[in-house]
Image (cartoon, helix red, strand yellow):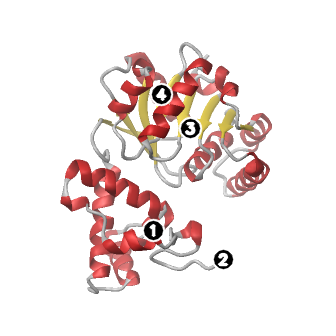
C-alpha cells in the first residue's frame, strides 16, 4: 500500500503541526495528530473542520476527501497511537534536546518500515538522523508557512537515508500537492537561509530609523512582489521562532545572522507577533 494511503502521524499540534494536519485531512488522508494539551483538542478539531469548510467553498478541496479526512482524524497525546503510520512528521519546537528525546520515546511505537520526517527549519538533519538511531529512514521535510496551502516544501537529504524511503516521501509529497525542492543538509536550508538574512536587514533598517515598518514592508511587497513584507512575515512566523532560528544560524554562519536588539527586546517583552496580538505591527485582539 502506498504511504499516502496509510495513516500519517504528526507530532506537534502547534501552528505548523495543525497546518500540516489541515492539508492532509483535506487530502482525505487518515491523520493521527499527537499533541500535549488534551484540553485544547476539542477546539483544534473544530478549527480544522471550519477551515476545511472554507477550503471547500474556495474549491481548494473536494467534499468527499474532507469528509473522509475529518471522519478518520485522531487527536491524541499518546505516541502509541502512531504504531500503524507509514510516515510520521515531527513538528515540535526547534530544540535539539527535545527532538532527540522524542525520537527515543517514539522508537518502540514505529512500524519497521515507517519513515520519520522532521519539519525542522534550522537544525541539522544529519545530526538529528544520527541521534535518532533511525538514519536509514530519517530525512527533513520542511513545510512552508502556512503549511495547509503553501505549494512547496524542502526535502533535505542526509547520507544515511535509503533511496527507497526518499522515493516514498517524494511520492507522498506529490500526492498532497507539494512541489519539492531537494537539497543537501546545510544551515537554514534554502528558504530560511535567505529569508532570515532579509528579516535581519529589515529589522536593522527599522532600528536605525531609516524607514518605518510600513515603508519597509511596502517596499518589498511592491518593489519585489513579495506577498508579505519581511516584518509582517516575521510576525506571522512568530518572533520567538525567528529569534531561535537566528541564534542557530548566527552560531553556524556568522555575524550576518546576529539577532538585532529590537527583535530581542520584543521577544523579551512577550510581543511575539500575530499570536500575541503585537510584534513589529499591532493586531488587536
Q: Is mark 1 in CB contact (under 8 Å) with mark 3? A: no
Q: If you read the primary sequence from the N terminus, does the residue marked by circle 3 or circle 4 appear first?
A: 4
The mark that comes first in sequence, 2 or 1, is: 1
**Label 4 vs label 1: CA separation?**
36 Å
Question: Is residue 195 rendered to the left or right of residue 96?
Answer: left
Q: Label 2, on which residue?
A: 285
Residue that badge 4 annotates = 169
Q: Say whether marks 2 and 3 touch (CB < 8 Å).
A: no
User: Helix, strand or loop at disc 1?
Assistant: helix
**Front residue (pair 43, 250):** 250
Distance from Cα at disc 4 to Cα at disc 2? 39 Å
Tag 3 and tag 4, C-beta contact below 8 Å? no
Residue depicted at 28% across the width and 56% down the height: 194
As measured in the structure, the alpha-carbon distance from the residue carrying label 2 to the one carrying label 1 is 18 Å
Which circle, 3 or 4, is nearer the viewer? Answer: 4
**CA distance for labels 1 and 3:** 35 Å
Element assignment for label 4? helix
Residue 3 higher or lower than 26, as above or below:
above
Which residue is label 1 attached to? 267
Closer to the observer: label 1 or label 3? 1
Image coordinates of residue 17 in percent, x first then y, are 58, 45
- Lower position in the chain sequence, tag 2 or tag 3: 3
Image quadrant assignment for residue 160: top left
Mark number, residue 70: none
The residue positioned 55% from the left and 69% from the top of the image is: 274
Dot 3 falls on a residue whose secondary structure is loop
- Tell me what residue is drawn at x 74 percent, y 37 percent: 73
Would you name the residue on which mark 3 appears? 176
Q: Work out whether 150 lies above or below 263.
A: above
Q: Is residue 39 visible?
A: yes
Amino acid at each position: 500500500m502506498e504511504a499516502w494511503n496509510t495513516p500519517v502521524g504528526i507530532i506537534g499540534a502547534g501552528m505548523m503541526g495543525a497546518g500540516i494536519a489541515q492539508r492532509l485531512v483535506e487530502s482525505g488522508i487518515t491523520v493521527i495528530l499527537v499533541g500535549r494539551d488534551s484540553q485544547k483538542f476539542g477546539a483544534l478539531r473544530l478549527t480544522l473542520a471550519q477551515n476545511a469548510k472554507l477550503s471547500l467553498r474556495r474549491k481548494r478541496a473536494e467534499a468527499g476527501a474532507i469528509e473522509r479526512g475529518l471522519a478518520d482524524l485522531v487527536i491524541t497525546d499518546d505516541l502509541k497511537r502512531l504504531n500503524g503510520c507509514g510516515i510520521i512528521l515531527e513538528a515540535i519546537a526547534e530544540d535539539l534536546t527535545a527532538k532527540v528525546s522524542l525520537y527515543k520515546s517514539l522508537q518502540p511505537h514505529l512500524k519497521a518500515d515507517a519513515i520519520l520526517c522532521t519539519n525542522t527549519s534550522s537544525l541539522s538533519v544529519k545530526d538529528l538522523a544520527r541521534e535518532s538511531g533511525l538514519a536509514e529512514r530519517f530525512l527533513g521535510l520542511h513545510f512552508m508557512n502556512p503549511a495547509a496551502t503553501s505549494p512547496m516544501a524542502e526535502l533535505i537529504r542526509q547520507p544515511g537515508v535509503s533511496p527507497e524511503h526518499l522515493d516514498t516521501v517524494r511520492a507522498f509529497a506529490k500526492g498532497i500537492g507539494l512541489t519539492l525542492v531537494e537539497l543537501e543538509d546545510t544551515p537554514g536550508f534554502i528558504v530560511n537561509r535567505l529569508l532570515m538574512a532579509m528579516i535581519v536587514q529589515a529589522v536593522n533598517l527599522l532600528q536605525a530609523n531609516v524607514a518605518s515598518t510600513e515603508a519597509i514592508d511596502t517596499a518589498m511587497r511592491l518593489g519585489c512582489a513579495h506577498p508579505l513584507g519581511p516584518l509582517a512575515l516575521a510576525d506571522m512566523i512568530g518572533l520567538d521562532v525567528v529569534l531561535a532560528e537566528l541564534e542557530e544560524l548566527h552560531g553556524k554562519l556568522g555575524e550576518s545572522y546576529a539577532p538585532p536588539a529590537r527583535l530581542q527586546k520584543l521577544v523579551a517583552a512577550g510581543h511575539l507577533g500575530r499570536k500575541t496580538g503585537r510584534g513589529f505591527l499591532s493586531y488587536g485582539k
